[in-house]
Amino acid sequence: MYRSRELATVLNDSGARVLVCLESLHRDVAAGVLGDTDVTAVVTTSELDYRARDDQRVFAGVERIDGEGAHDMAVLIERHPRPGTSRRHLRTGRHRVPHLHSGTTGPPKGAMNTHGNVVFNSQAYRQWCRLGPDDVVLGVAPLFHITG
């Protein structure tokens, strides 16, 4: 939901080299500002990739948009199967995850989440969805969202 100016600020401040976004946002917002950033790769996705197969009503009229020069996330996931996992022990109080929010009270800016915050959110989600050790989740929230 960033506007072009906000997106450009976040991309430039963060030094991001990859942008993941909806196809429609790539076309309508990002494409116009990417040339002025360090972004070298764009991965696009569509809400159609994640819909329930039997729920046609919600997505009636939604069509795929070819993101010129962008990689399609569904294709990338299909080409690169899930690697093995490893367990790492990180201290929960350490700052591990920066997130950039839209700056509702001013310009976009960064904030830090601790590893413990991210683990708690992940654990709550895992329990709520009743996920097991063999389940895989691609959890995507807007970058300005509290858990983004």
Image: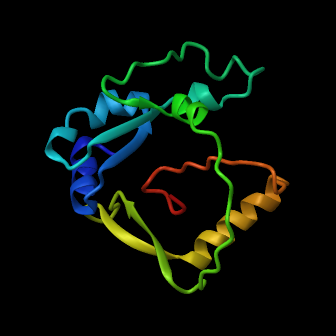
Q: In this rendering, would 89 be left or right of 115?
A: right
Q: Where's the N terminus, which quadrant?
A: top left
For residue 78, which quarter of the picture?
Answer: top right
For residue 34, which quarter of the picture?
Answer: top left
What residue appears at the point 78 percent right and 49 percent down from the top-left corner? 135
Residue 27 position within the rendered picture, expressed as x and y whole percent measured from the top left: 32, 27
From the viewer's perspective, is residue 94 above or below residue 97? below
What residue appears at the point 78 percent right and 20 percent down from the top-left corner? 54
| Front in this rendered view, residue 47 or 1 | 47
Q: In this rendering, would 7 be left or right of 142?
A: left
Q: In this rendering, would 7 be left or right of 144?
A: left
From the viewer's perspective, is residue 47 above or below residue 104? above
What colouring style does the render use?
rainbow
Residue 106 position within the rendered picture, expressed as x and y whole percent measured from the top left: 26, 64
What residue appears at the point 56 percent right and 30 percent down from the top-left corner? 74
Q: Can residue 77 be spotted in the picture?
A: yes
From the viewer's perspective, is residue 42 above or below residue 125? above
Residue 58 position within the rendered picture, expressed as x and y whole percent measured from the top left: 65, 23
Tell which residue pokes out farthest to the top in this image: 61
Residue 29 position within the rendered picture, expressed as x and y whole percent measured from the top left: 29, 35
